[in-house]
Amino acid sequence: MDLSYFQLTVLAFIQGLTEFLPISSSAHLLLPSILLDWPDQGLNFDVAVHLGSLFAVLVYFRRDVYELLKAWLRHLIQRESSEESKLAWLIILATLPGALAGFLANDLVENYARSAYVLATTSAIFALLLWYADRYAPAGKTLVDLNWKHALLLGTAQALALIPGTSRSGITMTAALFCQLSRQTAAKISFLMAIPIIFGSFLLRSNEVFERGLWLDQLGPILYGIIISGIVAFACIHFFMRLIERVGFLPFVLYRFGLALFIVAITIVA
């Protein structure tokens, strides 16, 4: 990991801040390498900051996660159905498209889709879709009203987030708005859906890290990245959930358009 602690701090902060906001973490993590010519953060850093993000969302939604897991196990073992067990199964169903897409297309995306122009294009296109859903999709349903069709729509949207610049949280919140959920409820289901998908990604990447023995001499930087990204991600979730009903998604839409223009501009200049 050829990064100083200052670089680790900046990148972990960016990851923690952007992972759960609808603005694309992949697009923002590209900026230091373009603007400052920093080296690639590497696999260890990716594993560390994703683990930090996972801890953040688990701690923030600990009560919901506990109730969902308890209800899911009761349904699995005792066949006892409840609203929580239904939601748990729907989250599992919504995870499958993203997991399948990651397994089949991850190498293709890594090799061919990580360009600045792809990031700028997807950032703008999906920002427009988010604006439309926030502006025109009716709201009124709750998590109790979700069914398997909604879960597949949310899961397909999450699979699209494999394309850099899309924003996993942004596209899942967009899909949730189209399912007629309120802004805050759309954000909540997006964050809950993040748990299994981030955990799966962490397992896949961490397996490669341990096979290579890459963590043995980098334990300090890894733990540092986990702590910084986790703290920032937790604060981000906390304030986002409080503000989203009041401010809506328009500020994030405008920001994404500005980001797209900025990426194109600096790419042309470079």
Image: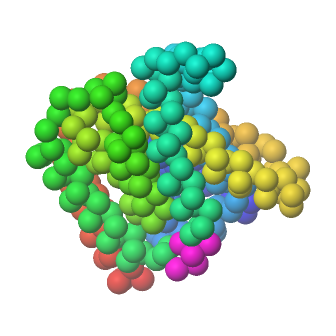
Q: Quarter holding the C terminus?
A: bottom left
Count of numbered circles in the view: 0
Residue 109 covered by magenta stretch: yes
> Looking at the picture, how far across and down is residue 111, in whole percent?
58, 78
Which residue of the protein is positioned furthest toward the front in this rendering?
Answer: 79
Q: Which residues are magenta?
A: 107-112
Residue at image point 17% right, 34% down = 139
Q: Quadrant of residue 24?
A: bottom left
Q: Is residue 254 left or right of residue 239?
A: left
Q: Is residue 44 above or below residue 219?
A: below
Q: Is residue 245 above or below residue 253?
A: above
Looking at the picture, the colour scheme in use is rainbow
Residue 222 covered by magenta stretch: no
> Looking at the picture, how far across and down is residue 243, in whole percent?
27, 29
Looking at this view, is 118 or 204 the one in front? Answer: 204
Q: Quarter holding the N terminus?
A: bottom right
Q: Is residue 82 left or right of residue 52?
A: left
> Looking at the picture, how far across and down is residue 10, in whole percent?
54, 50
Q: Is residue 42 left or right of residue 192?
A: right
Residue 5 appears in the figure: no
Residue at image point 34% right, 24% down = 144
Q: Is residue 114 above or below residue 32?
A: below
Residue 209 appears in the figure: yes
> Looking at the picture, how far across and down is residue 11, in whole percent?
56, 52
